[in-house]
Image (spheres, grey):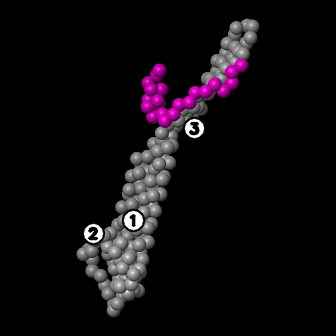
Amino acid sequence: MSEIQRRNEVSVDRREEMVVTQQPGYAATEQVTRDVAAEGRLRSALVTQIIGAILGLLEILLGLRFILKLIAANPNSGFAVFIYGITKPFLAPFTALVGTPTSGETILEVTTLIAMAVYALFFWLVIRVVQIAANRPSARTITRSTREQTPGSGEERTTHTTTRR
């Protein structure tokens, strides 16, 4: 076994070998080799979709908080209490970062906008790291071997075809 074959076997997820056709004097086998990169990319896509959904939910909640503060919603209403309670831990790192301009009852909560931008950048970075970690080149190799033997003459012919996709 060559060094290249050994290296390929390390990254191979599954190797199938089957006899396609077998008749007197004729046999054909097909060997399909697949690597784990394709499955890794599928898992990475699922993880990035989950991360994106979490980010989307967080951005919606923070956006609702920003709008409720901006329109001077009643802070004692059930919905406002719910939104403020859920979003408070996510705003904690940004609380004293900048001032909060007010005009009467209206509050322009700039820290919420900053938090939305920082969380979007953070989640984007996490998604990129997941994609880079899972982005290995995919290889699918199909090797087809055909052995034909002419009846009576004893003559044998072998053909090997390798296809990489």
> Could you say where residue 126 lies in the image, as x and y percent from the top left?
38, 56
- Which residue is located at x 39 percent, y 84 percent? 77
Q: Which residue lies most toward the left here?
A: 96
> Could you say where residue 124 lies in the image, as x and y percent from the top left?
40, 60
Q: How far, Cα to Cα, is label 3 from label 2?
A: 49 Å
Residue 62 visible in rendering: yes
First in sequence: mark 1 vs mark 3:
1
First in sequence: mark 3 vs mark 2:
2
- Which residue is located at x 42 percent, y 64 percent? 55
Q: Mark 2 points at which residue?
A: 93
Residue 145 located left or right of residue 66: right
- Which residue is located at x 41 percent, y 54 percent? 128
Q: In this view, does 122 lie above or below 12?
A: below
Q: Nearer the viewer, residue 157 or 42?
A: 42
| Front position among marks 1 and 2 | 2
Find residue 165 and name its label.
3
Q: Are marks 1 and 3 in contact (CB under 8 Å)?
A: no
Q: Which residue lies most toward the right here?
A: 152
| Quadrant of the snapshot with the C terminus | top right
- Which residue is located at x 74 percent, y 11 percent? 151
Find residue 120 and name its label.
1
Residue 141, picture quadrant: top right
Q: Nearer the viewer, residue 133 or 20?
A: 20
At label 2, which amino acid type do we have? Pro
Residue 125, picture quadrant: bottom left
In magenta, the rendered stretch is 1-23
Circle 3 SS class: loop
